[in-house]
Image (tube, rainbow, N blue to C red):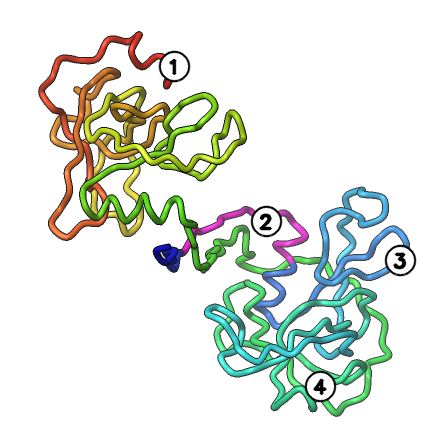
Amino acid sequence: MSEVLTAPLVVEFPFTRSLGPVQSAFLTGLRERTVLGVTASDGRVVVPPTEYDPVTAEEIRELVEVGSGGTVTTWAWNPSPRRGQPLTTPFAWVLVRLDGADTALLHALDAPGPDAVRTGMRVRVRWAAERTGAITDIACFEPDDGAADDGRPAAHSGEFTDTVTGITVPARLDYTYSPGRTQSRYLRALTDHRIIGERCPSCRKVYVPPRGACPTCGVATDTQVEVGPRGTVTTFCIVNIKAKNLDIEVPYVYAHIALDGADLALHARIGGIPYDRVRMGLRVEPVWTEGGRFPDHYRPTGEPDADYDSYKELV
Protein backbone atom coordinates (compact mmCIF):
# COMPACT_ATOMS: atom_id res chain seq x y z
CA MET A 1 0.00 0.00 0.00
CA SER A 2 1.45 3.38 -1.01
CA GLU A 3 1.95 6.04 1.63
CA VAL A 4 -0.98 8.39 2.25
CA LEU A 5 -0.18 11.98 1.34
CA THR A 6 -0.26 14.91 3.78
CA ALA A 7 0.17 18.63 3.22
CA PRO A 8 0.20 21.76 5.42
CA LEU A 9 -2.71 24.06 4.60
CA VAL A 10 -3.64 27.57 5.71
CA VAL A 11 -7.09 29.15 5.66
CA GLU A 12 -6.81 32.90 6.21
CA PHE A 13 -9.08 35.91 5.78
CA PRO A 14 -9.53 39.36 7.37
CA PHE A 15 -12.71 39.63 9.45
CA THR A 16 -14.03 43.20 9.59
CA ARG A 17 -16.82 44.34 11.89
CA SER A 18 -18.32 47.63 13.00
CA LEU A 19 -18.62 48.39 16.70
CA GLY A 20 -21.65 49.47 18.67
CA PRO A 21 -21.43 52.04 21.47
CA VAL A 22 -20.39 49.51 24.14
CA GLN A 23 -17.60 47.75 22.25
CA SER A 24 -16.45 51.06 20.78
CA ALA A 25 -16.08 52.54 24.27
CA PHE A 26 -14.31 49.42 25.58
CA LEU A 27 -11.68 49.30 22.83
CA THR A 28 -11.17 53.06 22.75
CA GLY A 29 -10.74 52.91 26.53
CA LEU A 30 -7.97 50.33 26.19
CA ARG A 31 -6.17 52.71 23.87
CA GLU A 32 -6.38 55.29 26.68
CA ARG A 33 -5.26 52.73 29.34
CA THR A 34 -8.77 52.57 30.78
CA VAL A 35 -10.67 49.32 31.31
CA LEU A 36 -14.45 49.58 31.05
CA GLY A 37 -17.18 47.15 32.00
CA VAL A 38 -20.95 47.26 31.89
CA THR A 39 -23.51 46.80 34.67
CA ALA A 40 -25.98 44.00 34.07
CA SER A 41 -29.58 43.88 35.29
CA ASP A 42 -28.61 41.84 38.37
CA GLY A 43 -25.97 44.41 39.37
CA ARG A 44 -22.95 42.41 38.25
CA VAL A 45 -20.16 44.23 36.44
CA VAL A 46 -19.30 42.36 33.23
CA VAL A 47 -15.77 42.71 31.81
CA PRO A 48 -15.25 42.58 28.87
CA PRO A 49 -18.56 44.39 28.46
CA THR A 50 -21.37 42.78 26.50
CA GLU A 51 -23.94 44.66 24.46
CA TYR A 52 -26.80 42.57 25.81
CA ASP A 53 -27.63 41.41 29.31
CA PRO A 54 -26.43 37.82 29.84
CA VAL A 55 -29.55 37.07 31.92
CA THR A 56 -32.39 39.00 30.29
CA ALA A 57 -30.88 39.50 26.80
CA GLU A 58 -31.92 43.16 26.97
CA GLU A 59 -29.60 45.87 25.65
CA ILE A 60 -27.37 47.37 28.35
CA ARG A 61 -25.36 50.61 28.21
CA GLU A 62 -24.38 51.48 31.83
CA LEU A 63 -20.59 51.67 31.56
CA VAL A 64 -18.24 51.66 34.55
CA GLU A 65 -14.48 51.87 34.94
CA VAL A 66 -12.73 49.02 36.75
CA GLY A 67 -9.16 48.58 37.93
CA SER A 68 -6.17 47.44 35.89
CA GLY A 69 -5.17 44.95 38.60
CA GLY A 70 -6.97 41.72 39.35
CA THR A 71 -7.00 38.16 40.61
CA VAL A 72 -6.38 34.97 38.64
CA THR A 73 -9.44 32.71 38.88
CA THR A 74 -8.03 29.83 36.79
CA TRP A 75 -5.15 29.23 34.39
CA ALA A 76 -3.41 26.86 31.96
CA TRP A 77 0.26 26.78 31.00
CA ASN A 78 1.19 27.20 27.33
CA PRO A 79 4.69 25.74 26.81
CA SER A 80 4.79 26.30 23.04
CA PRO A 81 3.40 29.66 21.88
CA ARG A 82 2.04 29.68 18.36
CA ARG A 83 2.13 32.30 15.63
CA GLY A 84 0.04 35.36 16.51
CA GLN A 85 -0.28 34.63 20.24
CA PRO A 86 0.41 37.46 22.72
CA LEU A 87 3.89 36.28 23.77
CA THR A 88 6.67 34.44 21.96
CA THR A 89 8.01 32.76 25.12
CA PRO A 90 6.09 30.18 27.21
CA PHE A 91 3.27 31.81 29.18
CA ALA A 92 0.03 31.08 31.02
CA TRP A 93 -3.45 31.60 29.71
CA VAL A 94 -5.35 33.14 32.62
CA LEU A 95 -8.83 34.25 33.51
CA VAL A 96 -8.46 37.47 35.49
CA ARG A 97 -11.23 39.09 37.55
CA LEU A 98 -10.25 42.75 37.55
CA ASP A 99 -10.84 44.80 40.68
CA GLY A 100 -14.44 46.01 40.58
CA ALA A 101 -15.55 43.34 38.07
CA ASP A 102 -17.65 40.25 38.69
CA THR A 103 -16.59 38.30 35.59
CA ALA A 104 -13.17 37.30 34.31
CA LEU A 105 -11.15 38.45 31.30
CA LEU A 106 -9.09 35.96 29.27
CA HIS A 107 -5.53 36.98 28.44
CA ALA A 108 -1.88 35.94 28.71
CA LEU A 109 0.24 36.09 31.87
CA ASP A 110 3.97 36.59 31.51
CA ALA A 111 5.50 34.26 34.10
CA PRO A 112 8.86 32.43 34.30
CA GLY A 113 7.22 29.01 34.59
CA PRO A 114 4.12 27.12 35.71
CA ASP A 115 5.41 27.00 39.30
CA ALA A 116 5.08 30.79 39.39
CA VAL A 117 1.37 30.71 38.55
CA ARG A 118 -1.46 29.89 40.93
CA THR A 119 -5.16 30.52 41.27
CA GLY A 120 -5.76 33.54 43.48
CA MET A 121 -2.50 35.30 42.62
CA ARG A 122 -2.54 39.04 42.02
CA VAL A 123 -1.72 40.38 38.54
CA ARG A 124 -1.82 43.70 36.74
CA VAL A 125 -2.14 44.86 33.14
CA ARG A 126 1.03 45.43 31.14
CA TRP A 127 0.03 47.99 28.53
CA ALA A 128 1.38 47.82 24.99
CA ALA A 129 3.81 50.59 24.06
CA GLU A 130 1.74 51.45 21.01
CA ARG A 131 -2.03 51.22 21.40
CA THR A 132 -4.57 51.37 18.60
CA GLY A 133 -7.88 50.46 20.21
CA ALA A 134 -7.76 46.65 20.28
CA ILE A 135 -7.58 43.89 22.88
CA THR A 136 -3.86 43.71 22.07
CA ASP A 137 -3.49 47.11 23.76
CA ILE A 138 -3.25 44.88 26.82
CA ALA A 139 0.12 43.34 25.93
CA CYS A 140 -0.34 40.77 28.70
CA PHE A 141 -0.71 40.51 32.47
CA GLU A 142 2.22 40.33 34.87
CA PRO A 143 2.49 39.28 38.54
CA ASP A 144 1.67 42.01 41.07
CA ASP A 145 2.52 42.01 44.78
CA GLY A 146 0.01 44.76 45.56
CA ALA A 147 -3.22 44.26 47.45
CA ALA A 148 -6.63 44.19 45.79
CA ASP A 149 -8.37 47.48 45.19
CA ASP A 150 -11.45 47.59 47.42
CA GLY A 151 -12.94 50.57 45.60
CA ARG A 152 -16.23 50.30 43.74
CA PRO A 153 -16.25 50.65 39.97
CA ALA A 154 -16.80 54.24 38.92
CA ALA A 155 -19.46 55.31 36.45
CA HIS A 156 -18.05 56.25 33.06
CA SER A 157 -19.67 58.10 30.17
CA GLY A 158 -17.85 56.03 27.56
CA GLU A 159 -16.97 59.23 25.70
CA PHE A 160 -13.51 59.63 24.20
CA THR A 161 -12.06 61.68 21.40
CA ASP A 162 -11.42 59.90 18.11
CA THR A 163 -13.38 56.80 19.06
CA VAL A 164 -12.72 53.41 17.48
CA THR A 165 -15.73 52.50 15.33
CA GLY A 166 -14.55 49.32 13.60
CA ILE A 167 -11.88 46.64 13.74
CA THR A 168 -10.28 44.23 11.30
CA VAL A 169 -9.07 40.95 12.77
CA PRO A 170 -7.06 38.46 10.68
CA ALA A 171 -8.52 34.98 11.11
CA ARG A 172 -6.07 32.18 10.35
CA LEU A 173 -6.21 28.41 10.65
CA ASP A 174 -3.07 26.31 10.13
CA TYR A 175 -3.61 22.57 9.83
CA THR A 176 -2.26 19.43 8.21
CA TYR A 177 -4.56 17.84 5.66
CA SER A 178 -4.49 14.13 4.85
CA PRO A 179 -6.53 13.20 1.78
CA GLY A 180 -6.67 9.50 2.64
CA ARG A 181 -5.81 6.53 0.42
CA THR A 182 -8.44 7.21 -2.25
CA GLN A 183 -7.55 10.83 -2.91
CA SER A 184 -3.83 10.09 -2.51
CA ARG A 185 -4.15 7.73 -5.51
CA TYR A 186 -6.04 10.47 -7.37
CA LEU A 187 -3.37 13.09 -6.64
CA ARG A 188 -0.53 10.76 -7.62
CA ALA A 189 -2.25 10.02 -10.92
CA LEU A 190 -2.45 13.75 -11.64
CA THR A 191 1.34 13.97 -11.50
CA ASP A 192 1.35 11.51 -14.44
CA HIS A 193 -1.24 13.65 -16.28
CA ARG A 194 -3.91 11.03 -15.65
CA ILE A 195 -7.32 11.63 -14.07
CA ILE A 196 -8.91 8.73 -12.20
CA GLY A 197 -12.25 8.30 -10.51
CA GLU A 198 -13.99 5.46 -8.74
CA ARG A 199 -17.13 3.60 -9.78
CA CYS A 200 -19.94 2.75 -7.39
CA PRO A 201 -20.66 -1.01 -7.51
CA SER A 202 -24.36 -0.30 -6.95
CA CYS A 203 -25.43 2.66 -9.12
CA ARG A 204 -22.38 2.37 -11.45
CA LYS A 205 -21.71 6.11 -11.35
CA VAL A 206 -18.10 7.29 -11.60
CA TYR A 207 -17.05 10.00 -9.15
CA VAL A 208 -14.18 12.44 -9.72
CA PRO A 209 -12.44 13.35 -7.49
CA PRO A 210 -13.08 10.05 -5.72
CA ARG A 211 -14.13 10.07 -2.08
CA GLY A 212 -13.91 6.37 -1.24
CA ALA A 213 -17.69 6.01 -1.00
CA CYS A 214 -20.70 6.71 -3.18
CA PRO A 215 -22.54 9.83 -1.92
CA THR A 216 -25.84 8.41 -3.24
CA CYS A 217 -25.67 4.74 -2.22
CA GLY A 218 -23.29 5.04 0.73
CA VAL A 219 -21.24 2.01 -0.31
CA ALA A 220 -17.47 1.80 -0.75
CA THR A 221 -16.05 2.62 -4.19
CA ASP A 222 -12.82 0.79 -4.89
CA THR A 223 -12.89 0.23 -8.67
CA GLN A 224 -10.67 2.82 -10.33
CA VAL A 225 -11.66 4.28 -13.69
CA GLU A 226 -9.59 6.60 -15.85
CA VAL A 227 -11.72 9.47 -17.18
CA GLY A 228 -11.30 12.47 -19.46
CA PRO A 229 -9.03 14.19 -19.89
CA ARG A 230 -11.49 16.21 -21.98
CA GLY A 231 -14.78 17.41 -20.63
CA THR A 232 -17.73 19.79 -20.94
CA VAL A 233 -18.42 23.07 -19.13
CA THR A 234 -21.75 22.57 -17.35
CA THR A 235 -21.93 25.96 -15.62
CA PHE A 236 -19.53 28.76 -14.73
CA CYS A 237 -18.99 32.09 -13.01
CA ILE A 238 -16.92 35.16 -13.90
CA VAL A 239 -14.53 36.26 -11.12
CA ASN A 240 -14.04 40.03 -10.90
CA ILE A 241 -12.29 40.36 -7.54
CA LYS A 242 -8.59 39.53 -7.42
CA ALA A 243 -7.69 37.05 -4.69
CA LYS A 244 -4.73 37.72 -2.42
CA ASN A 245 -1.59 35.76 -3.37
CA LEU A 246 -3.23 34.44 -6.56
CA ASP A 247 -1.36 35.65 -9.63
CA ILE A 248 -4.32 35.63 -12.04
CA GLU A 249 -5.59 38.81 -13.61
CA VAL A 250 -9.32 39.49 -13.38
CA PRO A 251 -11.76 38.91 -14.87
CA TYR A 252 -11.38 35.17 -15.30
CA VAL A 253 -13.75 32.20 -15.34
CA TYR A 254 -14.19 29.33 -12.91
CA ALA A 255 -16.36 26.51 -14.18
CA HIS A 256 -17.84 23.13 -13.34
CA ILE A 257 -16.50 20.61 -15.83
CA ALA A 258 -17.99 17.18 -16.48
CA LEU A 259 -15.07 15.06 -17.61
CA ASP A 260 -15.81 12.41 -20.24
CA GLY A 261 -16.76 9.22 -18.42
CA ALA A 262 -17.45 10.92 -15.07
CA ASP A 263 -20.79 11.39 -13.34
CA LEU A 264 -19.74 14.31 -11.16
CA ALA A 265 -18.51 17.71 -12.30
CA LEU A 266 -15.30 19.15 -10.84
CA HIS A 267 -14.38 22.83 -10.83
CA ALA A 268 -11.41 24.47 -12.53
CA ARG A 269 -10.30 27.69 -14.18
CA ILE A 270 -10.94 28.24 -17.88
CA GLY A 271 -8.16 29.84 -19.96
CA GLY A 272 -7.21 30.26 -23.58
CA ILE A 273 -10.46 32.03 -24.40
CA PRO A 274 -11.88 35.49 -23.58
CA TYR A 275 -13.96 35.32 -20.41
CA ASP A 276 -17.07 36.58 -22.21
CA ARG A 277 -16.94 33.73 -24.72
CA VAL A 278 -17.08 30.92 -22.16
CA ARG A 279 -20.43 29.13 -22.33
CA MET A 280 -22.28 26.07 -21.14
CA GLY A 281 -21.50 23.08 -23.34
CA LEU A 282 -18.00 24.34 -24.23
CA ARG A 283 -15.64 21.40 -24.78
CA VAL A 284 -12.34 21.78 -22.86
CA GLU A 285 -9.12 19.93 -22.06
CA PRO A 286 -6.58 20.27 -19.21
CA VAL A 287 -3.34 22.23 -19.48
CA TRP A 288 -0.43 21.21 -17.25
CA THR A 289 2.46 23.56 -16.58
CA GLU A 290 5.98 22.16 -16.52
CA GLY A 291 6.49 20.34 -13.25
CA GLY A 292 2.89 20.97 -12.19
CA ARG A 293 1.15 18.31 -10.10
CA PHE A 294 -2.33 19.22 -11.33
CA PRO A 295 -3.87 21.00 -14.31
CA ASP A 296 -3.22 24.73 -14.27
CA HIS A 297 -6.41 25.42 -16.22
CA TYR A 298 -8.67 24.04 -18.94
CA ARG A 299 -8.78 25.40 -22.50
CA PRO A 300 -11.17 24.92 -25.45
CA THR A 301 -10.56 21.82 -27.58
CA GLY A 302 -12.07 23.31 -30.74
CA GLU A 303 -14.77 20.62 -30.84
CA PRO A 304 -18.42 21.52 -31.38
CA ASP A 305 -20.29 22.37 -28.18
CA ALA A 306 -21.88 19.44 -26.38
CA ASP A 307 -25.63 19.04 -26.60
CA TYR A 308 -27.40 20.19 -23.43
CA ASP A 309 -29.11 16.81 -22.95
CA SER A 310 -25.68 15.17 -22.62
CA TYR A 311 -24.79 17.09 -19.44
CA LYS A 312 -28.06 18.48 -18.05
CA GLU A 313 -28.01 16.01 -15.13
CA LEU A 314 -24.69 17.50 -13.99
CA VAL A 315 -25.67 21.16 -14.01
**Residue designated by label 2:** 19
Q: Position of residue 155 (x, y in %)?
A: 79, 63
Q: Residue at x 72, y 49 (%)?
A: 51
Give the CA distance from mark 1 to mark 2: 46 Å
**Which mark lies nearer to you, 4 or 2?**
4
For label 3, the crowd category at 10 Å Cα-Cα, with few meaning under 14, some 14 to 19 and many 20 or more, is few
The image quadrant where one finds the N terminus is bottom left
The answer to which quarter of the image holds residue 194 is: top left
3 or 1: tag closer to the N-terminus: 3
Q: Are marks 1 and 2 in contact (CB under 8 Å)?
A: no
Magenta includes 204? no
3 or 4: tag closer to the N-terminus: 3
Q: Residue at x 43, y 50 (%)?
A: 180
Kindly give the residue lying farthest to the right in the view shown. 42
Residue 43, disc: 3
Residue 117, disc: 4
Q: Which residue is at the front of the view, 70 or 192?
A: 192
Residue 313, disc: 1
Which amino acid, by three-letter code, is at mark 3? Gly
The answer to which quarter of the image holds residue 140 is: bottom right
Secondary structure under the numbered disc 1 in the rendered image: helix
Q: Which residue is at the front of the view, 150 or 203?
A: 203
4 or 1: tag closer to the N-terminus: 4
The answer to which quarter of the image holds residue 35 is: bottom right
Secondary structure under the numbered disc 4 in the rendered image: loop
Which amino acid, by three-letter code, is at mark 2? Leu
Position of 226 relative to 180 (above/below)? above
Q: Is residue 223 left or right of residue 19?
A: left
